[in-house]
Every structure is written in C-alpha cells, then in structure tokens.
Image (cartoon, coloured by chain):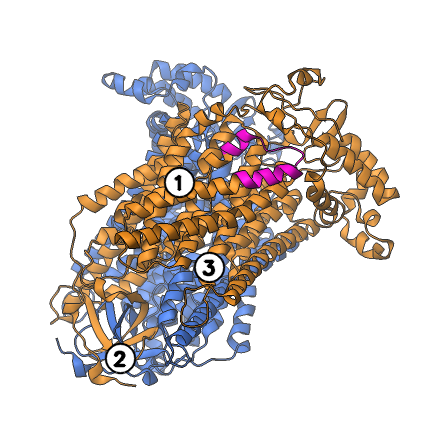
Chain colours: A orange, B blue
Amino acid sequence: MESGDAARLGPGRAARSPPPRLLLLPLLPLLLGRGLRVAASASSGAAAEDSSAMEELATEKEAEESHRQDSVSLLTFILLLTLTILTIWLFKHRRVRFLHETGLAMIYGLIVGVILRYGTPATSGHDKSLSCTQEDRAFSTLLVNVSGKFFEYTLKGEISPGKINSVEQNDMLRKVTFDPEVFFNILLPPIIFHAGYSLKKRHFFRNLGSILAYAFLGTAVSCFIIGNLMYGVVKLMKLVGQLSDKFYYTDCLFFGAIISATDPVTVLAIFNELHADVDLYALLFGESVLNDAVAIVLSSSIVAYQPAGLNTHAFDAAAFFKSVGIFLGIFSGSFTMGAVTGVVTALVTKFTKLHCFPLLETALFFLMSWSTFLLAEACGFTGVVAVLFCGITQAHYTYNNLSVESRSRTKQLFEVLHFLAENFIFSYMGLALFTFQKHVFSPVFIIGAFVAIFLGRAAHIYPLSFFLNLGRRHKIGWNFQHMMMFSGLRGAMAFALAIRDTASYARQMMFTTTLLIVFFTVWVIGGGTTPMLSWLNIRVGVDPDQDPPPNNDSFQVLQGDGPDSARGNRTKQESAWLFRLWYSFDHNYLKPILTHSGPPLTTTLPAWCGLLARCLTSPQVYDNQEPLREEDSDFILTEGDLTLTYGDSTVTANGSSGSHTASTSLEGSRRTKSSSEEVLDRALGIGDQPVSSRGTRLVFPLEDNA
Amino acid sequence: MESGDAARLGPGRAARSPPPRLLLLPLLPLLLGRGLRVAASASSGAAAEDSSAMEELATEKEAEESHRQDSVSLLTFILLLTLTILTIWLFKHRRVRFLHETGLAMIYGLIVGVILRYGTPATSGHDKSLSCTQEDRAFSTLLVNVSGKFFEYTLKGEISPGKINSVEQNDMLRKVTFDPEVFFNILLPPIIFHAGYSLKKRHFFRNLGSILAYAFLGTAVSCFIIGNLMYGVVKLMKLVGQLSDKFYYTDCLFFGAIISATDPVTVLAIFNELHADVDLYALLFGESVLNDAVAIVLSSSIVAYQPAGLNTHAFDAAAFFKSVGIFLGIFSGSFTMGAVTGVVTALVTKFTKLHCFPLLETALFFLMSWSTFLLAEACGFTGVVAVLFCGITQAHYTYNNLSVESRSRTKQLFEVLHFLAENFIFSYMGLALFTFQKHVFSPVFIIGAFVAIFLGRAAHIYPLSFFLNLGRRHKIGWNFQHMMMFSGLRGAMAFALAIRDTASYARQMMFTTTLLIVFFTVWVIGGGTTPMLSWLNIRVGVDPDQDPPPNNDSFQVLQGDGPDSARGNRTKQESAWLFRLWYSFDHNYLKPILTHSGPPLTTTLPAWCGLLARCLTSPQVYDNQEPLREEDSDFILTEGDLTLTYGDSTVTANGSSGSHTASTSLEGSRRTKSSSEEVLDRALGIGDQPVSSRGTRLVFPLEDNA
C-alpha cells in the first residue's frame, strides 16, 4: 500500500459537490434530519476555528439550513402536485380533454424548472471539499483523522475529471435532483402493481394471445428496428461531425429497448372517460403493461451483452445467446416470484378467517405485495416485473378471498399511490428538462429518434396485426391498428430507464432525447386522442356494465354497418385456443385451490388425490348450491358487470358459468370433466359475442357461432 | 492547509464500517440499487487488481451481493410483520386479550434479534476501508484520486477513536440497524396524524380542559420528578462506583422528558374492543396524543438549555427562560403550522367541487397533510407536532367537506399506514434489544427508572385529578384515576426520542432503559388491562352507537349504584367553560367558514361584514332547511353515532344541534346570537348526560341539569 505522500489534501481544488444523480437527499429529507445534522456538524463552516463552541454553533446552523432546504425542495414538489390536482379538477370539471393530468404535471414542472434554473442565483459550491489523491484503488469507506477525531466517509461515486471544476453550482438545483433509482425502486412499483391489479381481466384474457404477441414480439421488433435506425443516425452524425464521443451499436440497441416501453396513460384515461371500445382498451393497456416488463428485462440483457475478446462491440454469437438466456432467466424468474407471492397471499387469505379483520387483511396484502419486490431483488431478478405479475395474480385470485371492505381498501390504496407516483414522475420530468445538469441536445439524434420510433411502431403494429388477424376470430380492424399505432406514447418507464444511467455521453444524449419524446407524445398524442377516436370511427360510449336490450334483433339490423365488419371472418377457432386452455386449467384447478369459487376439486382432480382435494376445497363450494361466485370477473368496472343477461341464457362476464350455466356446470362437473368443458364451450361461444348496447356508433358484428 | 504527508492511507488499520445509527441503507434498499452498485463498483473487492475487467466483474458481484443483503434485511422485517399479522388474527379469532399486537411484534422481533445476534457468524469487516489523517478539520465531501479517476466520498459522522477496531463486525446486524431519524421522520408522522385524525371529538372536547391539564402540566410535572429522582439515582451510582462516564442533571431531565411520553396503545385497544367508558377513553387517548407533542418539544427545549459561562451544567436563569421560550415558540409554531394547513385544506375542499373526484380529493388531502410536516420542518418547528394538530383540524373541518368515498379512503389510508408503522416500530424494538451494538445495561439505573416513572405518574395523576375535580362537573372517580395511573405505558414515541441520539454514554444508558421500560409496560400492563378493568369496576360494553331504551326509568333505578356516584357533585359549571367558549366560537364562525354546516355567517357575523359573510357561507346552508349536517361529530365510531335520541329530544353526538334542536337553532340564529346560545346551552345541558345503555356494570349517574 502506497500511502503518505501519495495523498494530496487541498480543499481549494475541489470546489465540487456530489453528482446530482446520486443524491438521495431531496426525496427524503425526512430520512436525513439527523444524518445531515451529524454530517454537517463535523463539516467545517465558514466560522472561525478557534473556539470549538463557536464552530459547533455555526455547523449546527448550517445543518439546520440544509435540513430546511431539503424540506423546501420536497415542499416544492408537493405544491406542484397540489397545483396539478387543482388544475386537473378544473379541467375535469369543465370537461377539457386536450390536456391530461400528466401533461399538466409536466408543464408545471417545466415552469418551476425554468424558475429554478434562471431565477435562483448560481451559488458557487461551498468550499467544503477536500481532495485526497491515492494511486492505488478506491475504497468504499474512508476514515479521516482530523486533529485526533475520526470521521468516516463513504463513497458516492466516480466523477469524470473534466467536470470537477466546470460544473456550475446551484444548491437548489442539486436539491431538486433525485437519485435515479428512486424512480425505479420507489415510484414505479406502485404504478406497475396498480396496472397489474387493475387489468380488466375479461378482455385481457380474451385477447391474451394478441397482447402477448404485441408485448413480446412487438417490443423486440421495435427495439431492434429503432436500434438499427439509430445506429444509422449515429453513423450519419459521425460523418457530419456532430458526435463528440463514443456511441456504440449496443448503445443504440439499449436506446431501442428503453424507448420501446409504451405508456399510453393519456389515451387510456380518455378511453376510460369516453367508454371507448373495451377490446381496444384491453389490447392497448395489456400491451403497455407487459411491454414495460419486456423493456426492462430487454435493456438489462443488452447491458449484459459483453462479447469476449478485444473488439468489445462486434457481434458475438455466444454473448448474444447468453443475453437471450439472461432475458429468459430474469423474465421467468421475476414472473415466478410474482406469481408465487400472489398465490401464497391467496392461500393465506383463503385458509384463514382474516377477512373478519379488514385492516389486518389489507396490511397483509400490502406487505406480501411489497415482499414480492424485495424477494425478486434479493434473488437477482427484477422487482418491478415481479410486482406486475404479483398484481395480476392478486387481482385474479386473492381479490376473491378478500372481504368487501378490503377489496375497496386495497384498490383505493394502490390507486392513490399510483396517482401520486405517476404525477410525481411526470412533474419531475418537466423539472428535469431545465434542472438536470448533463443534457446533451443533439438535433439530428432527436429528429432521427422521432422518425425511428414512428417507423419502429409501424413495423411492430401493422405486420403483427396482419399475422394475428390470420388466427384471430375477432379481427383487429384497420381503425384499431391505426389507433394502436397512434397510441405509442412514451412515459414513466422510458424515463426511469433512461435516467438510471447517465454517466456516459451516449446515455446523456439518450436521456435528453427520451425526455423530449415523452413531452411530445404526451402533449400532442394526448391532445389528439379525442379527434383521432372520432376520425377513426371507434365506438365510444360503450358501457360494458349495462344489460343489452332484451332481444337481439335491434343489433342484427345494425350488423355490418361500419368498418368493424372487417372483423367478420368467424371460421377460425384458434384465437380462443390459448384462452380456452388457460381458462379450463384455471377454472378447474387454480380457482378452486386458491379461492372459494369454481367446481369442487373432488370432482376435477383424479380420484387418488381425494384427500388432498377435500382439504383444499373450501366448504363454501359444497355448501351453497347457488351459482358459484365469480366476483373477480371484471372487478375494476363494477359489480354489475358480473353477469350479462344475453338473450335468455345468462353468461358471466369472463365467459365462465353464470346462474344458468353454473348449475349445469355443477352437475356436469360431478359427472365428467368433458361435460364441464361442454359448458365452457357454450359459455365461450356465447361469451365471444361482443356485448355492447349503446355507443355513438352502434356497430354490432353478431357472429354465427362456429 | 497542511496536506501531503499529513495524510496516512492504510486500509489495514481501519477495519471499520459505518456506525449503525447512521445507516439509512436497510430501510430503503429500494433507494440504493444503483447507489450501492456505483459505490461498490468503485470499491475494490477481493479480486485481483491487474485486470480492470476482472475487477469490475468482482465489484459488480459485490454490489449485487450488497443489494441482495439489503433486500433480505427488509424482507426480514416484512416477514416479521406478516407473522405478527397472522398471529394477531389467531389471537383475535380466539379472543385472546392478554397480548396485544404490539407486544407480539416485540416478541417476534426479540426472537429474530436473538437469531441474528447468536445465529449468524460474526464476520469481521471487509478490508475495504482507508484511513486518511488530516490535522485540520473534517469536510463534508472528500475527493479521492485513484490512479487518475476521481471518487467522491461524503461524511458519515464521527467515530470515537476507541471503537475503531474494537467493534465486532456483523454485516447482518448492521443491515438491520436503521437510521434513528427514520422513526422520527417516516414512521411517527403517520402514527401521530392518525391519532389526531381519529380523536373521538365529542368526548375529547368535552374533556378538553382536563386533557390539556394532564398533557401539559402533567407531563411537565412527570418530567421534573423523574428527572430529579434519576439525578438521585445517578448520584447514588457515582457513590457506589457504578457510573463509568459523565451523566449530568440535564441528561436526567432529558430522560424525564422522553420517558414522560405515554402511549397506552394496548390499553386503548382493549378499551375499544370492550367498549369501555368513553370518557375515560377520551382522557387517556387525549392525554397520550398531546403529551407526545409536549414530550418532543420539552426534550428539544432541554437540549437547547445551554447555560452561558464555564460551568455548563449549573442552573442559569437566563438559559432556563430561553428554554421555556423555545418550548413555547416551537409548540405554538408547530400548532399554528398544523392548524393553518388543515384550514387551507378545508377551504380548498369547501370552495372547489373536488368532491366529485374522490381520487383527486384523497390525493390532495394526503399531500396537504404531508406538506404540514415539511412546512414545519422548513420553518424550524417540529413536524411531528404540526402533523398532530393538522390531523385534528382535518378531522374537525376538512372531513365534513369530503365526499363519502374520500372520507373512508382517507380514514383507511391512514389507518393502514398507522398500523404498519406502529407494528414496524414495535418489532424493531424487539430486534434492537439484541442487535443494537451500544447497549449500556445498568441495573441500578433501570430499577431506579422504574420506580421513578411509577412515582412520576402518581405525582402527575392524583394531585392533578384532585385539582381538576374541584372544577369538573363530572368528577374523575378514584377508579378512573387508578386506571390512568395504571395505563402509563411507554411506547413508540419514547423509543423514537431515545434512539435519536445514542452518542454519549448517558444517552446509551437511557436508550437501553427506555427499551426495557417499553417492553415491561407493554407486556405486563397490556396483559393486565382486562383484569384491572373489572377489578376497578369500570364499565365495559358501553356502546355509544346504540340508542338508549325509550324511557329513562331503567337508568334512574341504577343511579348511584357504584363508585361513579362519587362524581355526583353537579353544582359547578366551570368544567364546561372552556368547552363552551370554544364550541360557540367554532360553531358560529369556524364551522360556517370552513365547512358546509353551521349557521349562515350572515347571521353570526356583524352586519358590516355582510359581503364577506355572503361569500364565505356556502349556499347549502341557505338551501336546505333541513337540519344542518354535523357529520364530523364522532366519525371514527360509525355514522349511527351521529344522533342519539335521548328521551324525546334529539341531540347530536357532540352536543350540537340535531333534528329537534337544529331547527330551533336555525330559527334562533336568524334572530339573534344570544338565542342561538340558548339553544347551545340546552344542547349542552342534555348532551352532558353520559349516555350509556348497556354494560357489564350498568352505572348511570343521571344528573339534575344545573
């Protein structure tokens, strides 16, 4: 160990503060009261150093000042959100639809960012730093002996040498800059969990195949196309001399991955408000929820792509397959974690009488959902992805076992968390455009990126829709395809992925570009949704809660009256294949095991599992000869959505057995399994007919049941 | 600046990790994903240093390992809480009352603490530290130049030189040790806010005078007596030679302040479950809520007590009065902050139609309540105290303006947060007994402390009750006094105050003693509450929600049948004085301004305020000639509690006008103010009679209306 003279100590040369991206401080000044006080009570102030009492007083004041600044910066965000809420209310009150709350949050963020950037004096950093040179290596902990007292320091990160003196210091700007992991580990999980927990399951599962195709294949295609196009742009920039630092092919692919995470929050909000077509909603929402997960895992797989040998940016088949392996490993691992925690929660809530104590139940639900995140992180998987699948599992199984009060509690709890987190992220985005200190604006790259995401989305939606339509019973019409093309907004996930690493020049350029893409898509596309809906003749005012009129004639009259009749080819059954397989397994085994509904396991499991089946089946299933409860069918709508009386037969919303078919199902399941499948088929056959009664454009493609 | 050779760098001598009390890490491994990764990617691992790629790989693994450990340690707590919830359910299910959930959480915490302490190998700290001596002073930021790369370090705090090498290293123990400010700034605020938001207002305001006396005078008396007794104990310890370090009189007073914060969570839970006497409940709950605030401000005033001159621990009148001034300043400042934010929220919710959008409303409510905390901290007041008064204001005014859905949302949201935070703190307490590394067990001090808190509580309850009884209409009976004496549990607040500063020997001894006092009181007193209730003949089964039987005869028969008849002196009116003054002001001015209820301001304000009054009065007040809504009266019970039909006249729960008196009040208020006061008097006169219909001991002291 070289030491001694290798160290240079000189506060003069290091007028430098922590790099903004590592500052945890502003988010939780709460955490820091004491921490800061202790830290600053050791740091020397401007006061004289002769009297220790004087110095203590001065440092204490400084500590208080710092704590106060932390509180003020967090207050800024809270006031921003409050302002956003009040303005949203005004907009909703006046039915203004051209600007969504997230767009509004960004605008307010921008304004505050401008004020902070240009309105506050650029204070040069306090002369509190000390530079200490060492030839060896960096340690995570440093002990400094100051006149006999020992002070401990911890490593904050590396600083590029060029920036040590050049960065303009502005305390307030630093204070409002968060650790990027805050987004990924604190703000995204509630957003993602809520997305999973509120999936409209009937339509989600009915379109499961298409959604999976869009989310997996589509995101991969989009990532690859955007990556390659951007590589072309980067080459062009090199030719023109616009690029001042390295920008590799993997960087381009990484950009493709992060920008492929769509987040049509604005569009979906308008869909919800206008009651637009539920299948289109399911396609868009399902895709955006799942492709977030795909984009996360994809981007970390691309980062993990490290070819052996010297030329570290050439193609290497081994490294490529390793990356694919990592992708599959992380994805399936996170999926399993999420599903397992969900299943455990379902079992616990089923086999205890916890539902008598809603508070305990809600707390348990919250803790278990949170533990998914931690468990996945502890096992090296991705917490956010696990949380998504946990949310879906919780909604599908656990939700059924909860007491009525807990249902609304959990829904509302996560709704509030989601709302706050989302608006926080968007207002932070607005702020970051002016306060983030490492922007790299490159007009060529930005224009290239806009073109690339447009082409990437087109290359993803249209060909995939074409192939899906070959197999789908309900064709995805052109207007739906255009709407999906149009709804390729980028949002919180792309931002969180982009801000995670802004160390290199390439990443900084990506971050700036991502920010601008989010701004543009949220404002322009968000504002254009309502005109686009009417221009594309997409049905609005479809109320899935409402019973259709007693006879079907009125619908048949309208059959084929619109572009939706393009979806008229009903000969293929394949679209239901995945759904049916899943449904049958879920209905016969998973639901009875995990919830109080479904046919008794004693009838669906083989005879030799008798004892186990009896233990797992809840007594309610035998006790009530009433139709089985299927309360989870579409909980995010209303309870009235559960059963749609259709003609004279009753079908529950997600195609499972209702009052009429349920009794059959009960009888049937006692006889043979095939009989229960018969019932299922009938239910499916009927359930497949889209039930929409009212709408600005009443188009009702009634099918011949094949 | 001396530099160069003044610095010694040598990782060998500094096998030392951060002091546990400053570790933010375990609570939020979430926060740290990247932070740690970056930090550790710079810290050198055990790997060879020749190849930078190899090193990077090794450090990345180390970073992942660290992140994983963080997740595991947080998972430990979550599983602890989950286990606690399930066991609580079992206990509640079987109606076991001898152990409260908080006691249980502590037991589980203890068990895990033992396992962590003795079950995990004591790993000696990684050789990752670097010592760097400097003769000058400590800086808050350190730049280290490692072979041309710059790394940034931040100060974590001072380490006492003796401990640098002596502390046994155990990664897991460090990981589960939190920053003490986490308790104060993250876990306490929701607990305290919920306490304020759920104050049973009718009984709280009826007993306002007594509660204030207990909370302010009582806490001061208790603090002073405990402090002096402990000073005697400390003197004794010095004589015996049991004291190995300094322990000043101010330290003793500080101990008196922190240990005076009672937290009868166990007792109140049982009261709630058994529906014990509501007035006793109000006295206990009100006292415990307010004395938390008093204890916080008192302890910080004692810390601020710094006599001038050399003898820094002698009495100094100027410094004393300065401390009193600080106490009054902080307290009133925090109170004002809390009240102002509450009032602003009330005004916003009154004058916007935000209640059409419950999600927005709830989010606004949450943000405003949080901003109280930050605002108070930013202004140098105490956030926790501000949050308490904000909660009370929100419950009293804002709650009335909220939509029905938001009411249940906000209640449930804070209930869940409160539940989680409280059980988290208690399980952490159990854990800390074994994992906290700086315990100072002193049997003499501990025994002395137990005696002191007993005497302190006695000297606070009995004399105060005597003086209060001189003025009270409802005497506080001996059994009530004994019960209050018995209910002097210590809990989360004492713990949070004690763990806040454990730097000195005296503070460490206090912390250990506080921990043991909390354990003892929660387990023993919590377990003894039910026997004590029956032994003291305190009514249980009093259901304030239930209508009493149609005639009063059955009650009169029972009149005087018990110790409660000691409260029979009805000649004094003084007890209602404070309440009446407050009530009249609140009813005539505050409620009409801040909510949709109360008499129109146009009638209560002087004529020259006409325009203002018309603006502030909500149209509802004029529109509906129906009885004014008084929905806030006792919301934490049920809506059924609002109106108690008493005999043939109807009185709303908090003594204000109900259906019968309300119409009178409306007419009255249109005439004169004095008339409205007449109504008020009548309402008070009737409302004063305790309405209890059923109970294991049906004692009903019916009064002659004086």
Instruction: Classify B624 as above or below B523.
Output: above
**Numbered disc 2: secondary structure:** loop
**Numbered disc 1: secondary structure:** helix
Structural distance between the alpha carbons of marks 2 and 3: 33 Å
Q: Which mark is residue A644?
A: none
Name the subunit of mark 2: A
x%, y% of residue A589?
75, 49
Mark 2: amino acid:
Glu
x%, y% of residue B28?
43, 59
Q: Which mark is residue B392?
A: 1
Name the subunit of mark 3: A
What residue is drawn where x is 36% and y is 72%?
Answer: B19
Mark 1: amino acid:
Ile
Furthest-right residue in this view: A671
Residue A545 visible here? no
**Is the N terminus of chain B in the top left, top right, bottom left or bottom right quadrant?**
bottom left
**Numbered disc 3: secondary structure:** helix
Q: Which residues are magenta?
A: A462-483
Q: Residues within 10 Å of mark 3 (few under 14, many from 20)?
A: many
Q: Nearer the viewer, mark 1 or mark 2?
A: 2
- State the residue position of label 3: A302
**Is the C terminus of chain B in the top left, top right, bottom left or bottom right quadrant?**
top left
First in sequence, mark 2 or 3: give its number: 2
Q: Nearer the viewer, mark 3 or mark 1?
A: 3
Structural distance between the alpha carbons of marks 1 and 2: 60 Å
Structural distance between the alpha carbons of marks 3 and 1: 53 Å
Q: Which mark is residue A135?
A: 2
Mark 3: amino acid:
Ile
